[in-house]
Image (cartoon, rainbow, N blue to C red):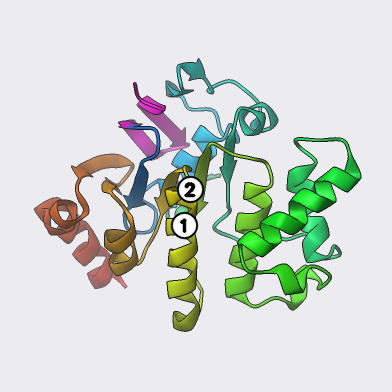
Amino acid sequence: MSFLSISGVTKRFGGVVANRDVSFEVAPGELVGVIGPNGAGKSTLFEIITGFYRPDEGEVRLEGTRLTGLSPDRVCRLGVARTFQKLRPFPAMTVLENVMVGALTRTRDVRHAREHAREILERVGLGDKAHAHGRTLSTGQRKRLELARALATRPRLLLLDEVTGGVDQGSIPGLVRLVRELHRDGLTVLVIEHNMRVITAVAQRIVALYLGEVIADGPPDVVARERRVVEAYLGQAYAQ
Ligand code: ADP
Ligand code: MG
């Protein structure tokens, strides 16, 4: 059975069609990459899966349960967590407190939330930063904090929006390793990634979007060589 099912999702913003009849399935335990040039509709799709946007048409289901129409809070409690492309740590809070915000979606016991948050910080390699403030972290560390906050909600499905975007080259291998480990430990992961080298190394399957539409879906080496995918990326390169 499919774990995540996206069927016929269309989302318009005025005249812009951000997602056009997007359909694909994700199996339990799969790590699927979502690629596409800027403006392809990747982040919009994540907003729809997580309940921040409502599609004009189509629906999203998790293990048969309809997510479309539910609040982001409900979707989170059903086990879907995401990181944001634009990092949003709460600046006045410590790293630990930021992660506790995620943990408190699962428990009202503050002590328990703190313990859980500490475990997660160790897991993502920020154990020694627990009492630092969000704003003092490097971009790579902030990405780890975003991940920690998402993991603290105990997700079954993790959505990562540009996990290596804006990160210095030196921090990329560590982040990739972490995503691989989380996947190996059983999480189903959907990852938006701009860096083709990263995505072909990490994903089991790639879905390519262009102008809101799925233009390819398959094994990374096959998708990376598809004519429409190459053209979509070349088009972007020429436009810059
Ligand atoms: P990607 O993440 O692939 O770069 P997005 O999903 O952010 O693409 O955007 C897809 C298209 O939808 C773009 O043309 C973008 O300008 C438009 N779009 C996204 N969000 C909004 C919004 N809230 N209001 C208006 N247009 C939007
Ligand atoms: Mg985006």
Q: Nearer the viewer, residue 238 or 137?
A: 137
172 up-or-down from 15: above or below: below
> In this figure, which residue is indicated by the disc labeled 1?
181
Q: Nearer the viewer, residue 122 or 33?
A: 122
**Looking at the picture, which amino acid does disc 2 mark?**
Asp
Q: Are marks 2 and 1 in contact (CB under 8 Å)?
A: yes
Percent position (x, y) of residue 208?
27, 48
121 up-or-down from 156: above or below: below
Where residue 128 sits, quadrant-wise, is bottom right
Helix, strand, or loop for circle 1? helix
> In this figure, which residue is indicated by the disc labeled 2?
185
Q: Is residue 89 left or right of residue 154?
A: right
Q: Is residue 192 left or right of residue 108?
A: left
Percent position (x, y) of residue 184?
42, 50
Q: Which residues are magenta?
A: 1-25
Q: Is residue 7 visible?
A: yes
Q: Is residue 206 left or right of residue 58?
A: left
Where residue 59 sits, quadrant-wise, is top left
